[in-house]
Every structure is written in C-alpha cells, then in structure tokens.
Amino acid sequence: MVDERSGFDYIVVGAGSAGCVLANRLSADGRRRVLLLEAGPRGHWLSGIPISFAKLIDDPAANWRFRAEPDEGSGGRVIPVPRGRLLGGSSAINGLVFVRGQRLDYDTWAQFGNRGWGYDDVLPLFRRMEHFERGEDEWRAQGGPLRVSEVPERSSLYDALFRAGAELGLPPNPDYNGASQEGICKTQATISRGRRMSAAHCYLRPARGRPNLEVLTGALVSRLILDGKRCVGVRYRRNGREEEARAAREVVLCGGSINSPQLLELSGIGRPEVLSAHGIEVAHALPGVGEHLIDHMSPRMVWRLQPRGVTYNERARGLGLVWQAVRYAATRSGFLSLPSAPVLGFLRSREGLEAPDIQIHFAPFAIRGPTDRRLLPEPGMTCVIYAMRPESRGSIHIRSPDPREAPAIRFNFLSDPLDRRILIDGVRWVRRIMATRAMDAFRDAEMKPGPDVASDDAIVEWIRATAETTFHPVGTCRMGGDPMAVVDDRLRVHGIEGLRIADGSIMPTLVSGNTNAACIMIGEKASELMLAQG
C-alpha cells in the first residue's frame, strides 16, 4: 500500500544549493504550501567546519560517492565524483570557493536564445543573494542570505604569489567577482566567522519554522507521477515505506547534474533507446536528457617549499593539528577555517583572448594522493589547474530501473584537442609563476609531475594518468530551444507541464570557475520565475 499526501502547491526534489533557495523563497509569504524532499540526512556534525571538505569528500554519511566510468581521457581510471547527500547538498561538503564566473558566460547563454539569462539579467540575482562582508559597490551587495567573505589569513607565501603574478603581468585583483576576473586574488568563500555558510544554513534554517514548509529527509524519490503530459507529483521511499505526494502547481527537480537526469529517465522521460534498454516505458521522448555533461578536469601540481613553517604540512600534523583545533575552537581561525584554496589565479592561456580561460587554485598544503588525503610529511603547496570553459562532452544515463543504483557517468575527458592545449598551457603557467624572483625564497623542487615531464605529449599523459575532476558537473538537462535541450529559458521541461528543473544540470555551458555560486543563483532565478506566475 502506498501512502498518499496532498495539499502541496509545490514539491521541491533535492535540498541542495538551489533546492534550499526555492524552499525559502516559495514559502516566504505563507500563501503557498511547499514540500522539500531530501534523500540524505539533516546534516553532518563536521559540515560547519570549513576544512571538513577533506573528510566529507568521500564520506558516505554525507556523500553520494559516485564514480565515473573509466575512459581513455582518464587513462582507464575510475574517478571519484562526490556530490552532497544531506541538507545543503554539495554546498555542505564543498571547498567553499565562491566564484560567479564571467560576463561572457551568461551572455553566451543568452546568445543561445535563453532570454533573461544574460549577465545584466543575473547580476541583480547575484547581488540579492549575497552579503559580501567586505562591503558593497556596483557589483557586490550586502543584506542577502548568503554570507561571503575574503580569506582573512595573511601569509608571506600568499604575498609572494601576488608578487610573482605581477612579475608576469598578472597584478593582484581585489575582487575577481567584480569588474574583471583576471589576476592573482585572495579567495572569496562561503565562510563567515570561521563557519561554513551552506545553502541549508543560510536559506533553509531561517525558513524551517514556517508552517507552510515541510522538510522530509531520508526520502529517496523513485519516480515522477505523470498524468498524461503533466507532472502531478512524486513517489518516494522513506523509513521503508512507499509514499506519494501531489503538487497542485509544480514539481521542481533540484537533484543536480547526476540525480536530475536519472530521475527523469526512471520516470520514462529521456532518450527512447536508453529507456527501452532498461525496460522503462517511454512517457515522453526527450533526447537531450543525460547528454552534454561537462566538468572541469584538473591536474594537481605539487611543489616542495622552503623555509619550513610556511605550509600546513608542518603546522597541521601531529601536535600541530591539536594546536590548530584549539586555535579554531578559540578564534575560528587557522587551518580548520580555510577553504580548499586561499589564493586563486585567473589567466589567459594565450594572447588575444577576450577573457581568462585558466583557473589555478593555490593551496598551502599537499596531500599524499586522491585516495589518501593525509598531509605529506614535508612542506608542500598544491596548484590545481583547469580549463574554465572545456569543450569535451560526456553523458549520464541510468544503469537500471532501480533508483538506488548509481547511473553511469562518462566524462569523455580530453576528447577535444583545445582542452588538452589549455591544460598544457596551465601547467607551463604554474612553472613560470614558480620560477619568478618572488618565489626564490620559497621554491624548493617540483614534486608532481616533476621537471622531467617537459614535452606536450608527456604533460598530457601525466594529466591523463593522474588528474581528477574539480567536482563541477553541469549540463545534463541543458537549457535552450533546440532539439537536444531539456528545459526552456523559464526552466520548464519541454513537453511536460508542471515540471521544472533548477540546478547545475540546466547550464548550457560551464561557467568560468567554481559552480556553487551559479547554482544558488539558478535557485533564485527559478523562484523569481515561479512567483511571477502568481
């Protein structure tokens, strides 16, 4: 027997970055009844501590722990694809780096025919959602739910990186989310007073007491309920029981670029050949579902530094870690309060480009490897590199009709030669930065990949054998008006009434940088579009 629940105006599937925004905004005036469904738990005791990303990135208590299919671009390796599985979604486990992207990104979306998504359209949404602790100006704002701060920690190493960039024509940039992105910059992060500012903390927590908002955790949605070509509700499993919930107005998928296309396919919406292969009746043919997957592939260079004491490899090991914990408890500062990288670089791979196409994360520590995140015993710095607007495209499709079985993720990394060229240039850029006079006092030796990896072919093979993702999958329910688009520019699923998607899966192209800020903006945009309908 299936328990049925009704009386909801909206059902939001997934309490991640965009889902928490929608739950807050749709329930704000008290007139609409909203149900928010999350497959994971309410939270994780470590999540509020910023450095917890190093633990939560592979913790099944808070993470879907997806794995990508081995392919040629990753040297036949199985690459981890972490995604948050708790209130706040990936904003509750990520590296906390806050990057909006470039004007070019959103103007490109608009050029594809997506009205209302140009930079001038979305800038007010970015400003409305944030409280930038450094102050406001033409681009930045205060008073929004999401608190954003600049990394307060000072370091001679960071100062040297700023000077190194200036030597190479990359002056320090005081606000890469402002007028220009280019330069070496102090990281802006979703951290306030040493605490993680997840979407659950900033958007959902203030709304939890509203009588018209119901939040259910541990609720795995297995399929959408369709009445012809209209979505009228969802079926989910919770506490060992099958339940259904009905929405009088709309269902909104906020499961992210992996779970949203999976749920569409489980419900009979997608590529007919994929659905038929798994015995799922085709309710609505939509060939773009699960296609157009894009992510940032990122090689990680590691340098041994001198003098001792400038990196957290010495300062946060053994008794040093105990001291860092005491320091954090007392002052909310130090190693435990950091995002994944306190310094960023945005630069152009070659002359003539309109905007930067490479991003570098400078982290003042080095770990043993992707599956062993303990700190190395010697002082080290990690430089994470990616091509910000990659051209390689992959896919995500179900393996079976079982919603508990993870879908097949195929990145198809390095399949486009431009991606290979930009990553090679990124490696060479890091080497130029490290070879500057400013870095003479800190540079010891290149540990990964090492100076012997010098030719273009050798660099590509090293990337193929070692690079991970930067955990920014997008595009699998792409927005647009062409036959391969899944949603229109109002985020409505083509051909299905009463169903929208609001998460990173709708991005037509990958934004230039980390994706969490854009996903929260998408939640704001979706709420604006829905509330405008009355």
Image: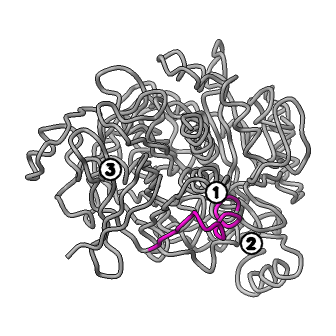
Is 219 or 439 nearer to us in this picture?
219
Asked whether the viewer can see residue 468, the reply is no
Amino acid type at mark 3? Val
Estimate the x, y position of residue 110 in percent, counting from the top left: 54, 19
- Residue at 35% x, 81% y is 239
Which corner quadrant holds the C terminus?
A: top right
Residue 430 position (above or below residue 347): below
Mark 3: few/some/many CA within 10 Å (<14, 14-19, 20+): many
In the rendered image, which residue does mark 1 sit on?
Answer: 30
Q: Nearer the viewer, mark 3 or mark 2?
A: 3
Mark identifier at residue 336: 2
Q: Secondary structure at mark 2?
A: helix
Magenta residues (range): 202-217
Q: Does the magenta portion include 276?
A: no
Q: Secondary structure at mark 1?
A: loop
**Mark 3–mark 1 distance (CA, rounded to whole Å):** 22 Å
Asked whether the viewer can see residue 492, the reply is yes
Mark identifier at residue 456: none
In the rendered image, which residue does mark 3 sit on?
Answer: 232
Amino acid type at mark 1? Gly
